[in-house]
Structure formats: C-alpha cells, structure tokens
Amino acid sequence: MSGEIEDRLAAISNRGLYRRTRCVSGPQGPRVLLDGKPVLLLCSNNYLGLADHPRVREAAAEAAMRYGAGAGASRLVSGNMRIHRRLEEQLADFKGSDACLLFGSGYLANTGVVSTLAREGDVVFSDALNHASIVDGCRLARAETFVYRHLDMDHLEWGLRQAEGRGSLIVTDGVFSMDGDVAPLEEIVELAGRYDARVMVDEAHGTGVLGTTGRGTVAAAGLDGEVDLIVGTLGKALGSYGAYVCCDQPMARYLTNTARTLIFSTALPPPAVAAAMAALELLREQPRRVEKLQRNAAALRAALAERGVPVREGETPIVPLIVGDPGRAVAACERALARGVFAQAIRPPTVPPGSSRLRLAVMAPHTKSELREAAEVLAAAVPAGPPTSGAPEQDQRESDAAPRRVFDGLRDAA
Ligand SMILES: *Cc1c(COP(=O)(O)O)cnc(C)c1O
C-alpha cells in the first residue's frame, strides 16, 4: 500500500483539482492577513460582518463564562440547555414557523433531515446544483433520487408524474451557493401541492441576505407557512456556527426522534448559540445592514460590468466569474491575490466540470472604493472571452450527480 495515497493525490493534482488550505490571521473582516499578506477578502460568507461584531463577540464570551465552553452531550442526553431553547424560539419567530430545531451544522441538518424523511419506496426530487450536503442526504436515504435540471420546472414536473404518487420531498437551495441565483419557489410550492410532496428549502445563503429584512427566499417570495421545512445555517450571515430547521411541531418531534445527525452528535456549544442569538438580534434591530449588503452586491456587479467583465444579473451577494478550466481558475485566483484581492477558485466537484470559477462574495462592511478596487483587479486577472475547459460541459456535478439509486426515469429524460 505504500505510496498509494501519494498516487491518489497525484491523480487529483494531474486533473488540476488539488486543494490546500490557506490561513487567515485575525477576524473575518473585509480586509485580512492571508498567509501573512494583507488582502481584500472577497470570498467569505460573513455577509453582514456579524462574525466579528463587538456585541456578537461579547455574547459568546459571556456565554462561555456562564455556561462553559461545551454542551457536554447530545440534545437527547444532557446537552439540551435553556440557551438552545431560547435561540430555537427566536428563530421560529423570525421565520414565522411553529417550531425550530437546532442542528450541529448545515451539513448535519441537510443529511439528517433528507435521509430520515425520504423512506424506502419514496422519491426525492433534488435540483442538480443543490449543495453537497443535500446530495449526501439523498445518498443516505433509502429512497430513490430524481435529480432535476437546474431550475427546470418542466423537468421536475415530468419527474413527479413518473413517480406516480411516490414523490415525497422536493428539496432545493433557496439561493444557490456557487451561482447566486434563486430557486423558483412559488412554482415549486405549487407543484408540490399538486403532486402531494413536501418542500424543503435550504436558506444557507438566503437568511440575512434576501428580502428587505433579510428573512430569506421563502419570505421574499411571500410563501410564509407554505414550505414544510426551512433549513438554515448559523455559520454564514449569522456569523457563528451551527444550523436550524424550521417546521411544524409534529415534524420537529419526528426529527427529534429519527434524525441521526441530531441524535448522535453533541449539542452546539453555548458560545456559538449565544453569538448567533446576538447576531439575530442585530439583524432584526438593524435591517439597514441587509440593504447595505444588497447595495454593495449591485455596486460590485456594476463595477465589473463597466470594466467589461460579463456578470449575470442577480440580487444576491454571490457573483460567479466562470473561467471553465480548473487550472485557469487557480491561475486567475493567484493573479488577483498577487494584487491583493482574495476570491477563491472553486472547482469540481463543488461545481460541475467545465465551470470552474472565482466565486465572489460581497459583504456589507465593504466600502464602495474597495469594491471598485476589487473589480479593477479581477477584470485584469480573469481571462477575457467565453469560458474554456478541457472537460465537456455537463448539467450535473461529476461525483455528486450520481446518488446511489437514481430514479430510472432521469436517464430516459436526459
Ligand atoms: C454552507 C452551506 C451548507 C452547510 O452549512 P454549514 O453550517 O456550513 O455546515 C448547507 N447548504 C448550503 C446551500 C450551503 O451553502
């Protein structure tokens, strides 16, 4: 076996897909020290700048002193504390749902919820560009998975018809994490009603970001109370760590009894819970932060377009600059870094083959002049012209597109 892992690494490297971690010193602000070098940070999901807000830090510090650093056990043993309950109540109130359940992370929430809801004989319907944690939830479920083409409601409906009543769950990102586009929730809810399926929306990049008060894609679409499960993370706009599922009371009790990622994992640490609570309070007190984020996103798009960089219209702070080939994406990232702008290159399997990109993420605390500076640097760093790639364009992700039991109909339709 000796050298076998090196061989596997070499194979990854040969495909231009080798990854390594970089290191940030200090908090996640608009400017950071990256591997010792000052850069403008343009790929953090700390959208509202709350991860390093003084009130959020103080709340975490105070909770550590009052309740300790860790919860000590899972929620179902001794790890369920008053502070968990309080945050659940506040999130349910914010989202307008009956109940809310905290999970260890968005990854754990998605894998836990999808795998326990979709049972043997059921079919789960999942957008081709859903987050990897949803894909993995489908893989863990005993159900079959129908992957519908990104945002394609005709394909989804075709699949629902083929499933002949076995369609149990439609699951989608609200805001797609690597593209920044938004799911057609109204149509999804309508189809779900017609075909008697549940709807689950992942608001990881919607909460704190979309709608005038940052309540997310479901609220922005006027669908309060019409989506069965809203999942969100505390790790992005809410500046902390952990996740939540908003649903009705019976669903919350069902998840408490069956979601293995909730049952078999330690409860969130009190400082993370308190930090998220303080961030949620700030979001509700100061919705202007959300407006600033939205204005900044528009300003960056405009500044890039002015410099001839093709950007898709959009209302979210996620702006993909698609390059195509993974090696070219990494080279573009390094060129921008050399001029002090950090926008990480994103490659397969995070995005489909042939669509490697720089994924820009705007934050509310960025200044207009920082965004102009970033646009200038990126216009020079990203190759002009249409994306080029060694790999064929595909609709789905290489490794993520093939959950274990794909509904046969998908192949016929594709
Ligand atoms: C980041 C992300 C997750 C995972 O959330 P974590 O709390 O970071 O584990 C889930 N879904 C989407 C769409 C995401 O972007």
Image: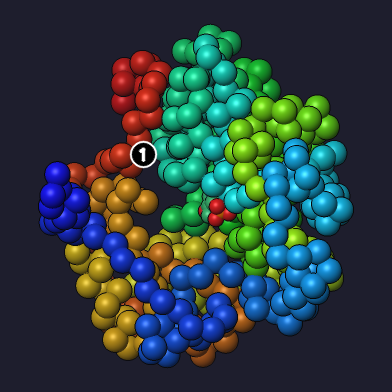
SS at mark 1 in the image? loop
Residue 358 visible: yes
Quarter of the image where one finds residue 404: top left
Q: Is residue 185 visible?
A: no
Quadrant of the image occupied by residue 398: top left
Where does the image place residue 19, in percent across and percent down from the top left?
A: 29, 62
Relative to 99, is 269 on the left or the right? left
In the picture, measured across the screen, residue 346 lies left or right of residue 250, that is left
Q: Give above or below for 383 relative to 243.
A: below
Q: Is mark 1 within 8 Å of ligand 1?
A: no
Tell me the quarter of the image containing the C terminus: top left
Residue behind mark 1: 400
Instruction: Name which residue lies at 26% across and 80% down.
Output: 335
Q: Residues within 10 Å of mark 1 (few under 14, many from 20)?
A: many
Kindly identify the residue that appears in the image at 16 percent across and 55 percent down.
6
| Count of marks placed on residues | 1
Location of residue 302 in the rendering, given as x and y in whole percent from the top left corner:
48, 75
Which residue lies at the image location 31% right of the left edge and 17% below the top edge?
A: 412
In this view, 150 is above or below 11: above
Residue 397: image x %, image y %?
33, 42
* Towards the viewer: 411 or 204: 204
Question: Of the residues shown, which amino acid type is indicated by label 1?
Answer: Asp
